[in-house]
Image: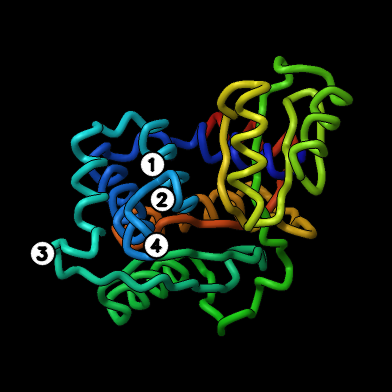
Amino acid sequence: MAGHSQFKNIMHRKGAQDKKRAKLFNKLGREIMVAAKSGQPNPDINPRLRAAIQAARASNMPNDRIKRAIDSGSPNSADAANYDEVRYEGYGPGGVAVIVEALTDNRNRTAAEVRAAFTKKGGALGESNSVSFMFDRIGSIVYPASVGGADQVFEAAVEAGAENVESDKDGHEIATKPEDFMAVKDALAEKFGEPESSGITWKPKTMTALDQEQASDLLAMIDLLEDSDDVQNVFSNFEVTDEVMERLMAS
């Protein structure tokens, strides 16, 4: 969990939380619309839609915008937008593996934007499945350490159907199969309340260590990628020492 938490902390402190609210809401709304189109526009029977709505509410997206997004994805909607789910893979500075998930109505535009972001910071876009073998596709549910001890969280998670739990001084990360994610999340929410973060993610099997310059370039590349309206998520397998992290925070 240490590498995962370290990456999240760096991204948080480097300003990922300061993205323009409108851009964030547009991305959340797009996911809600696609989720509604991919199944029933009813969150009670559509787990993906329920997860998308929960993510939007966690980011304080107004209810009227959430409703409009659901309506746009409904079968009778006049909204003609049709978004494709696309995954890009490649290597960033220092040979770090990077996975980019996008929702796009123009594959050529999105591919060009993603390629430009990789190239500008010394990375290289690869072929499909060129780096995904270095990651596990999991449902991730993260709770702070304050919810309980490692044994208590482990027992509750296993009972709920989780596959694994990693606990340290920062908290608990519960891993599930993607198809079990919502059921486990709902069960744990009843016991511990809403998690600190949750979602379907790509978890690195191994980490790649970076020096300060490489980490700075990678963070800048991720910022460029996330600035694209089409890019929904960016995952990487980098790690840095505490000394490098301190210098990154100060820069």
The disc, 2 or 3, on the residue closer to the chain's N-terminal end is 2
Cα gap from disc 3 to disc 1, whole angstroms: 21 Å
Amino acid identity at mark 2: Leu
Please give the residue where the numbered disc 2 appears in the rendered image: 49
**Which x, y percent locates residue 1?**
76, 40
Amino acid identity at mark 1: Ile
Above or below, comparing residue 166 to residue 215 in the picture:
above
Q: Residue at x 65, y 33 (%)?
A: 187
Above or below, comparing residue 218 to residue 157 in the picture:
below
**Which x, y percent locates residue 226?**
39, 54
Element type where label 1 sits in the image: helix
Amino acid identity at mark 3: Ala
Q: Residues within 10 Å of mark 3 (few under 14, many from 20)?
A: few
Please give the residue where the numbered disc 1 appears in the rendered image: 53
Residue contact at pointers 1 and 2, CB within 8 angstroms: yes
| Residue farthest to the front, as pictured | 45
Out of 32 and 20, give the one closest to the viewer. 32
| Residue farthest to the left, as pictured | 78
Residue contact at pointers 4 and 2, CB within 8 angstroms: yes
Residue contact at pointers 3 and 1, CB within 8 angstroms: no
Element type where label 4 sits in the image: loop
